[in-house]
Amino acid sequence: MNTAHRSRRLAATLLTAVLAGTGLSVAAAPAAHAAAEDAVAKLPISSYSGLAVDSVHQRIYIADQHEGQYVGTVLVYNFQGQKVTSFQHENTVSGLALSEDSTTLYVGERGRVVTYDTDTLQQNGAYGAAYDTCGRQLAFAGGTVWSTDAYVFQPYQCATASTGLDMLTNGTVSRTGWNDVGRLQLAPGARGQNRLLMGQPKESGAADPFLASFDVSGTTPVRNASRRFADTDGKGALDLKDMAANADGSKVAVADATAGTRLLNAGDLSNAPDQYQALPAGANATAVAFSGDGKYLARGAQATGSTPDLLVQSADPTDATPPLEFAFEGSLDGGSVTPRGLAWSQDGARLFAITQSAGGTEYWLHVIQPPAAQYDTRFTGDLTHSPAQAVAGEPLAVRGRLEWDGPAPAEPLKVTAVRKDATGTHQLGTATVKDDGTFTVLDEPDLVGEATYTVSFLGDLTHRPATDLTHTVTVGKAAGSIALTAPAQATMSGGVHITGTFTAQGKTLSERATLTVQRTDRLGTGTLSSVTVAADGTFTIDDLPRTRRSVTYTVSWPGDDLHTGSTASATVNVTR
């Protein structure tokens, strides 16, 4: 399993005490170093369009839009990552929003907004809305639900469609008069504040996409701040993937796929004086979320290998405590955090992350209980291999050592490995790290030439990923051999009968070997009929010599792409 996580249990009371501490500093009690469990659930959905967390009832709501299929699903999971139920809709569903008191879940459909009672999980209302074909976004702010709507004939037109802002009032979803181009994103301000955030994605085609803040305390929304980010040369434009207000409403964090994480002052959307550290090289921002208790910030990304896809850190940008890092890489965990795929429980005890496959057709739910600290890891020394001469089709062992700080892991750590050769990159699975840090990756290279092995430690809940280590091996051809058994004496009339065995090490030949036979006597050298090796590797040669005295028979095989050629000779004394 190519994953950054392995589970470890921690009592709920201990977890509460750990998370109640300040920042992400290491608690003094040794037990605080233990990692809480990270539950992972494979979601039975093919698309993702919304996430809402109900901390009162401890439920997670996930929308599957089923774009183009005219049906939709809302999945309901508990805080342990177990499926509770699902809401089936006869129409595409998209955005989700939860009332601040967690009594009502709002679900966006093409032509209406549907509500559910979160106590009974039963539908209790439906409100007509302007028809939408691009995925209705929902946000709850200022005591009401805000919605987007866009109508086009083909899905590809949604990126540049005219999208309106609507609000739920007096039993219907009505237009506010605000509109702009593209799939506009909505996000609420802090709990209890009458603020709504709106952002324009890069795909809208706008040269300089905007971010805006609205006062939604009255009967109509009033824009009170807006910003575009490109400089005078047109560089630095916003590439919006997600946005979130912090717990006290003073700041807004923006996941910008180009710029990383932007931290803005909520009042005027200007840059905050202190910014978060840059995401790791190679990681593109996809999601951002503040915990409801105001302590933590989660930043999601798309990255490869051991580069972290998720960082969890102090919400205070001046706190230099290293973030907790998680790398997702594998068919059991997803490859990256999906855009708008992060949310916290209100108390900050759990982080919920939606990850997706590279193609965006498979999704996973991660329920993460951040520990008090993570520790550094590193590969020490170089990788080595044995045997010294690697041979195509034969076992090869690649060995190394991983070191880690902090207490010994409760369960063995695992490293992942890949081999890259002329035909591409090949996944080699995982190898268990022994107590002394050593590990062995087993492989059987099947191509002659250079093979580069890359070993990764993707981290777990208490250990940060290590920098990848590479090692290049020159893979040679496997040996072929021929053994002959011939009589010492023979007669011209009786002939010569020779038996032999052909052996090719390494990868099995695709077809039986054909051997060349030459006869050398005092009259010269000539080629006899070739022989085909039997399935068990044996062959026979029968010949009537043409002259007396010493006759030498030479049997040879030219080799192939993966095997060296071989030759064997036998000399027979021939009489009349």
Image (cartoon, rainbow, N blue to C red):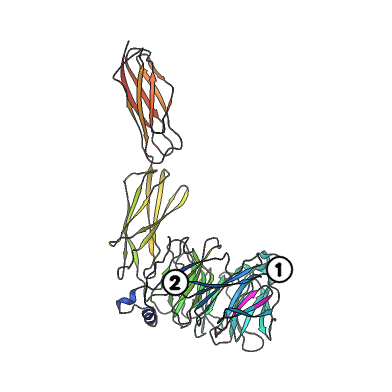
Mark 2: few, some, or many residues within 10 Å (few <14, many ≥20)? some
Q: Image quadrant of residue 469? A: bottom left
Mark 1: few, some, or many residues within 10 Å (few <14, many ≥20)? some
As drawn, 98 above or below 397: below
Q: Amino acid at mark 2?
A: Leu
Mark 2: secondary structure: strand
In the picture of the structure, the residue carrying the numbered disc 1 is 152
Q: Which residues are magenta?
A: 100-113
Q: Answer whether labels 2 and 1 touch (C-beta < 8 Å).
A: no
Q: Is residue 24 magenta?
A: no
Q: Amino acid at mark 1?
A: Val
Tell me where residue 406 appears, x and y as whole percent.
Answer: 31, 71
The quadrant of the rendering that contains the N terminus is bottom left
Tell me where residue 334 appears, x and y as whole percent.
Answer: 49, 64
Mark 1: secondary structure: loop
In the picture of the structure, the residue carrying the numbered disc 2 is 311
Q: Is residue 394 left or right of residue 234?
A: left
Q: Is residue 107 magenta?
A: yes
Between 533 and 178, the one nearer to me in the picture: 533
Reading the chain from its start, which is encountered first: label 2 or label 1?
A: 1
Between 61 and 124, the one nearer to me in the picture: 124
Tell me where residue 278 appears, x and y as whole percent.
Answer: 46, 71
Q: Is residue 513 visible?
A: yes
User: Which residue is rendered at x = 62% and y = 75% of the image?
Assistant: 137
User: Which residue is rendered at x = 39% and y = 27% of the image?
Assistant: 539
As drawn, 372 above or below 337: below
Q: Is residue 558 left or right of residue 27?
A: right
Q: Is residue 209 visible?
A: no
Question: What whole-number distance in Å separates the C-alpha atoms at marks 2 and 1?
Answer: 37 Å
